[in-house]
Image (cartoon, grey):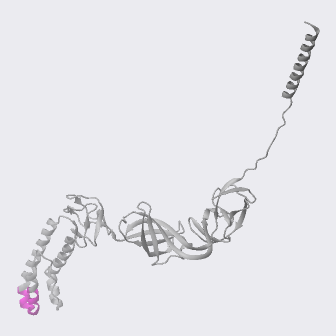
Amino acid sequence: MNNQSRKIILILLSIFISALGVFISWKLKPIEERTEVIESHRLVKVSTVELGDHKAEVRFSGKLSAEDKIDVFTEVGGVLLTDNFKQGNTFSKGSVLVQLNATEFSNNLKAVKSQLMTQVAGVMGDLKMDYPSEAKDWEGFLNTIDVHDQLPELPEFKNEKLKRFMAGKGILNTFYSIQGQEDKLSKFCIYAPFNGVLTNTTLKKGTLVRPGQKIGEFINPASFELETEISLSDLQFIQKGSKVNLHSDDLNMSWQGVVSRINSSLDPSSQMVKIFIKAQGRSLKEGMFLHGVASGATFKNATQINRKLIKNGGVYIVENQVVTHKKINVLYINQAKAIVTGLANGDQYIADNMKGLYEGMKVSMSN
């Protein structure tokens, strides 16, 4: 290899070593760290204030019960003869609701009536002899006694001596005994006191009924009453005769009711006042759960907000993406809403994501 070639190789080798040194030094040079502060804002939901007229709404809920409702009890014992004494069956006013077997009792009553006829017939001779002016009345009484019919009224006693005479013969005792038994016989049959339906029964035909036993429940399905409670503050908007709106979530139907009664005392445990609302209409049922709304006073130039948004006597609003606490005046409040003043048209109050809010916090807004 000549000198010229050796020089070229050395030059190329020198260039390579220099380039390799530059590359290694560049690789080993520390990288400058760049930090960028990114400011994040909480996203909150806001609503815009629109001042207007708002009515106070008294909200309540409760279950319906029939206004005309009776528990069916039997005052006497006997075997049930009624075949249609079953849940869901309807009865018109005055129709037979319950009939118990009274054959034995009825026959015993007929025997006592026959005994009375014998007693009166036995004294007719004495009456015609000693009390001729009263004899005709007693003879008419005797002739009208029918063992199959209601006992006629006793003739009027115009003579105290005659009264004692008839009592001594046991006639008065027998007469009043029969009247008591006739009254008891009438209790073997129970009549419907109004148009209604059986909602509960505990017996079937042929079952032996005990005296004083509850055997069913009878209601009038045409008229109902809702019992509920309201606060003392809401009582100012409710009075007897007030109209209220009732609604069923299950049926998505509404009815109008009328306040029929208001209790004059507070419930000591809840500190609420009981009110009773009369309601009528198709599809209403015993035990149905309803929501109700009654309108109260109208407040002008006010706004209505969720009561949960009120914190420390005010609400949080957003101005230039910064949270501010603004004082308000509460005019009316119920279980869900509050009617307030103190906010201006266009104010944007925070309606959600309230936890941890404070004045001066920067936020982003969504509607």
Dominant secondary structure of the residues highlighted in magenta in the image: helix
Counting from the top left corner in percent of width and height, residue 302 is at 62, 73
Counting from the top left corner in percent of width and height, residue 152 is at 15, 81
Residue 126 magenta-highlighted: yes
Q: Which residues are magenta?
A: 125-139
Residue 338 magenta-highlighted: no
Foreground residue among 239 and 25: 25
For the point 10% across and 91% down, which residue is it? 131
Q: Is residue 62 above or below residue 127?
A: above
Q: Residue furthest right?
A: 3
Q: Is residue 258 above or below residue 352?
A: below
For the point 82% across and 40% down, which residue is it? 34
User: Is 323 displayed left or right of 297 in the figure?
Assistant: right
Q: Quadrant of the N terminus?
A: top right
Q: Is residue 302 above or below residue 211?
A: below
Q: Quadrant of the C terminus?
A: bottom right
Foreground residue among 125 and 308: 308
For the point 57% across and 68% down, which residue is it? 334
